[in-house]
Amino acid sequence: MAVRLYDSLTREVRELKPAHKDGVFRFYNCGPTVYAPAHIGNFRTFTVNDVLRRLLDREFGASNVKHVRNITDVDDRTITQAKKEGKPLAEIAKFWTDKFHADCEALNCLKPTVEPTATGHIKEQVDMIEVLMQKGNAYRSADGSVYFKITSFPGYGALSRIKERELKVTNSAFDADHKDDIGDFALWKAYKPEDDGIVQWDGPKGASSGRPGWHIECSAMIKKHLGETIDLHTGGVDLLFPHHENEIAQSQCCNGTSFSLQWYHSEHLLVEGTTMSKSKGNYYTLDSLVQKGYSAIAVRYALLAGHPRKQLNFTLDSLHAADSALKTLRDFRAKLVTAIKEAAAPATSSRFDAAIAPLCDDLNIPGALGKLFTEVNNPLPTDQGVLKADLKSFDEVLHLIGLKLDEVKAKIPAEISHLAQKRWDAKAAKNFALADTLRAELTKAGWAMLDRKDGYSLEALKQ
Ligand code: AMP
Ligand code: ZN
């Protein structure tokens, strides 16, 4: 089933296809800035991107999807936090990167194929800035910083449709001290001891030492890990301007070729109808919700419950609703696992293909949830092959309850493995009465044994 997605650049729903001959789909998602815990708004964007990634894996094959998501470990916010805590920047970044990874794992988000850091790619950024200076797209300012000259790129504004007059208003609050034009943006920021503490690197030829601007980080990491032209670039809607507009300008002027063939921006999360802020008391992290007694997986469910291209209003009530929906899904899974007995091959299609179709149609997650529950509430089919196909696919893309096989294995208690092996041996010895008794013991203990021709696997009936 072809995956079609709204493209923020052409404003059309377009089919996603790998453009390169090697058939690898190149997908970049702007990652977190690691100076504090990510909030649940950030995680709306990351869980939506996780569903997109799983859908692409299903469509193109996991080994044909290269997913890069960066870590922004140097910018104004990370430097300010390091100074506030009197710690090295790298220590702050590592601490919050580890926390981000733990939260992603709790939320069932897959790791990207590559997760580059901005500080690990200073040379690549400096190289790009030097090319832009040589080509006349960038200039050194009086203080030794380097700015991108937006009038040098006629395509500037194509993504955000920003007009020159609006640009002036938008940027009027920005520091215009050293720029030729108010719309120009920093590629390299000259070192300022009062702002930057001890954070500085050698700059591009002709510029001062200092640090990269935020936008060039993504352009350089994309070029290194995905190449000059990629298939899809995503992020939250706030990144559309100026971040993504600036990425396009830098990359296209430096590389002389198309940058991202498609763009996708998911809308923001609101909490109790308004933007999240610490002063309003509606600012949630994953930890703060877990401390209130909610499960991380209920948070995943609640974050996925709305259409990604519409704002989603998060409430604590939505977590209660998520809990009961998840219980229905877990009960269904247990029913399915118990019903699977024979070593039949899985059918080629599953009843749950109907729930994939809305995902392929512009990532309509609520539509997919609707179809999922329709099938969950229908009577189970008797065909063993269909049951097996259902077990594989019903939670494959939304990944609301499923554990990966190795995670299941890691959780199998020794006595259960022992019982299962005994049953397998009894079956091999054609002692079917003993095999049935042992299966009943396993079921009572909360485990289902799935037989294949060449072995078996164990599935927890409840998670
Ligand atoms: P940051 O760590 O601030 O660089 O943001 C990481 C990601 O979270 C970006 O893709 C942002 O667009 C996204 N984001 C920030 N705030 C929200 C929000 N309230 N709702 C959804 N996504 C958000
Ligand atoms: Zn980015």
Image: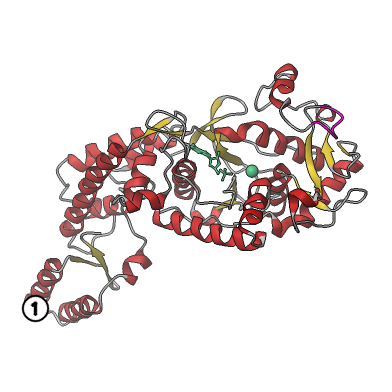
- Residue 28 inside the magenta-drawn segment: no
Residue at the disc numbered 1: 434
Q: Is residue 122 above or below residue 3?
A: below
Residue 120 vs residue 463: left or right?
right
Under circle 1, the secondary element is helix
**Three-letter code for the amino acid on which mark 1 is drawn:** Leu
Magenta residues, dominant SS class: loop
Residue 89 vs residue 110: left or right?
right
Residue 157: x and y, percent? 71, 25
Residue 194 vs residue 313: left or right?
right
* The N terminus - image quarter: top left
Residue 101: x and y, percent? 49, 58
Residue that appears at 73% across and 56% down: 121
Task: Name the one closer to the observer, 133 or 446.
Answer: 133
Q: Is residue 162 above or below residue 82?
A: above
Residue that appears at 58% across and 29% down: 8
